[in-house]
Amino acid sequence: MHVVFVKMATEDDKQELKSFMEGGNNCRFYENKFPNADELVVVQVNSISELGAYVSLLEYDNLEGMILMSELSRRRIRSIHKLIRVGKQETVMVVRVDQEKGYIDLSKRRVTAEELERKDIEYTKAKSVHSVMRQLSETVKIPMIELYEKFCWDLYKRYHHAFEAFRQLAAGDDSVIAKYNLEPAVSATLKKIVAHRMTPQAAKIRADLEITCFSYEGIDAIKEALRAGEALSTEECPIKIKLVAPPLFVMMTQCMNKDEGIKLLEDAVSKITDVIKDKGGEINVKCAPRAVSERDDKLLQSMMETLERQNQEVAGDDEEA
């Protein structure tokens, strides 16, 4: 009897967890069920057709939308696959929303570089909030939608963004959630999660440099200058320099204090300048030390991968008839 009882309890637990996961653990990020026209949203590309790309709106519980071919790029499109890929995430603008029919028309070409950067920051914050809410939901076994309705969507209104509210809660400000009369177990679990997840993140600092030397020492002089810059590394802010493509180099560090990290790279640039000019070389600071986003890192990585592929190509592969 004891063995049978344990088996039945285990199966019940599995079924309860399965029902919970399937029935209540998916939820949109924001209170509105549909986005508004002219709003920026992050989507994932599901499929591509002659008409355009079918996508899922990640912040709106994977509602389906479509980017028409004419809204992919301002330039003439020769191949849609060069502009967009299945599985890739894109930031797009909402053009039209028909809630009755469920149509959401989107545009990639109308999004500016500045808007793209702002949305990247906003989405990263919203994704962090959603991750907290998911962990809370799974721990206390309350559907995410109920928790969002109970307090989280109101935090967006009170603090402009729930991420800022969670940061204050992580710093010990219990007044953030006091008005919601949460159950003690829910309140304690939420505080524990945000304390773990909302710890300060190291800022990524980067500078882009063009360095040349056509004197006798040539490449050795460049190496010496770069080593002199890296020598200023500290345990808190290690400096790394990578070659993108001659003569372009990127100098990077990560530091909890952004201002200190920028100052350190500025000192390293000054040191490199002194050494390379003493050797008869030249330096052009393409981009001064500044904090960079995750998107900047992705763009840099993509550029380096493209250049690597180009370097691997063998001249004469494409023969003309």
Image: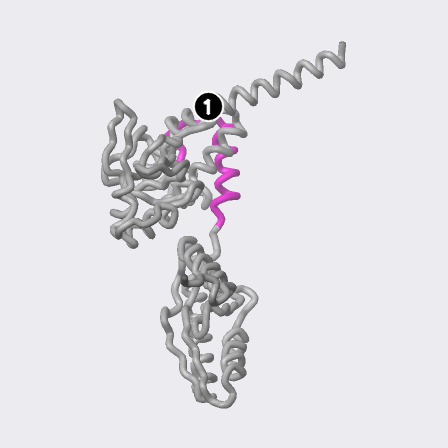
> Percent x, y for residue 126?
39, 41
> Percent x, y for residue 316?
47, 66
Which quadrant, please, contains the N terminus? top right
* Residue 175 visible in the picture: no
Residue farthest to the front? Answer: 321
* Residue 138 visible in the picture: yes
Amino acid on which disc 1 is placed: Gly
Residue 19, above or below 66: above
Image coloring type: one colour
SS category of the residue bearing label 1: helix
Q: Residue at x 43, y 53 (%)?
A: 294
State whether the magenta stretch is mostly helix, strand or loop. Answer: helix
> Percent x, y for residue 286?
36, 71
Q: Residue at x 44, y 41 (%)?
A: 87
Residue 70, above or below 239: above
Count of numbered labels shown in the rendering: 1
Tell me if residue 259 is in the magenta stretch.
Answer: no
Q: Residues within 10 Å of mark 1 (few under 14, many from 20)?
A: some
* Closest to the observer, 47 or 255: 47
Mark 1 = which residue?
Answer: 24
Magenta segment boundaries in residue numbering: 177-199
Asked which quadrant contains residue 257, the reply is: bottom left
Residue 237, above or below 69: below
